[in-house]
Image: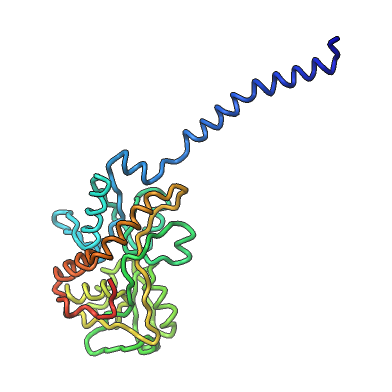
Amino acid sequence: MTTHKTILGRRALAGATLALPLVAVAGAARADTAPESTFDRVRRTKVLRIAAFPGAAPYFQKDLATGEWSGACMSMARDVAKVFDAKLEYLDSTYGNAVLDLQSNKVDLAFALNPTPARALSISFTHPMIIHPFGCVAKKGFDPVKWEDLNKPDVRIVFDLGSLHETAARRYCPKAQLTGYKTTDECTLALQSGRADAHILAAVLGLAAVGKNPALGSYRLLGEPTVALPSCLGVQREPDTRFREVMDAWLDMNRGNGQIREWLLESLASFGVTRDQVPSALSF
């Protein structure tokens, strides 16, 4: 005998059975619309998009007449592109904007970024490219040896905004006259025109700046304390870690066999910096 409860039970079971395919279809739809990972996109499109920093020699240098890019990081980027059998696309950026460019999926890779905790909230970082000591380009006649030599009310210090150069200047030279500019080129102009006494820069960038324009002054590594930080590659933060794993393997191999050092030294040489002018504290 079929009771009222039995009929209700059969209807409930039928409803549940009909709902199962709908749940499966909805799950499949969600999977189909999941964001494409960097690894899959680069392999599909055969395009590697990088952030390029005008004026950040020897990492990047742009010929304003031809629009062509050169520099150590361009050599590295071309080598990475070969791994993926991809061509390069460049987005003009700055150290301060590179994190936003990665977050907004404008680029796949940003070279020569220091992995600060604040940046790590938004993007991921590779193994170190180099361990990079900090110092300054000091005007002629000014020879600072330690950070405290800059930390005086009559010393005028410049730095590029949003970078660790700014962080170091504000931390170790709070008593000085601090001025931030959007690009390193603007900082160089301030020093060149006599509006600044020192330009805070990591060693590779500082050596290149003096190599390009010896009239600026001298590059000085600063001590007490020694500030030396890893310089890494920034990548998008995403569940699929294959792209970052490839980059880590690429970095470990090219650091281990000395190729990254050669790319940096070759680029520095193009700005008149000889190998014996590279501080021994500068680790590649």
Find residue 227 and report its image quarter: bottom left
Pick the front one: 231 or 216: 231
- The image's colour scheme reads rainbow
- Asked if 186 appears above or below 54 in the picture, the reply is below
Of 165 and 26, which appears nearest the observer? 26
185 relative position to 22: left or right: left
Residue at 45 percent across and 49 percent down: it is: 238
Q: Quick one: quadrant of the N terminus? A: top right
Name the residue at the top extreme: 1
Considering depth in this image, is 217 or 17 the residue closer to the camera? 17
Identified at 30% across, 81% down, the residue is 198
Q: Measured from the top left, where is residue 149 in percent x and y?
A: 35, 89
Residue 15 in which image quadrant: top right
- The x, y position of residue 90, in whole percent, is 27, 51
Q: Quadrant of residue 152?
A: bottom left
Q: Position of residue 57 (x, y in %)?
A: 23, 67
| Image position of 18 (left or right of 243) | right
Can residue 52 be seen here? The reply is: yes
Residue drawn at (69%, 23%), measured in percent from left and top? 16
In this rendering, the answer to whether 68 lies above or below 228 is above
Q: Position of residue 182 (x, y in %)?
A: 34, 66
Q: Taking 250 as reference, is 86 above or below it? A: above
Viewport quadrant of the C terminus = bottom left
How many numbered marks, from 0 up? 0
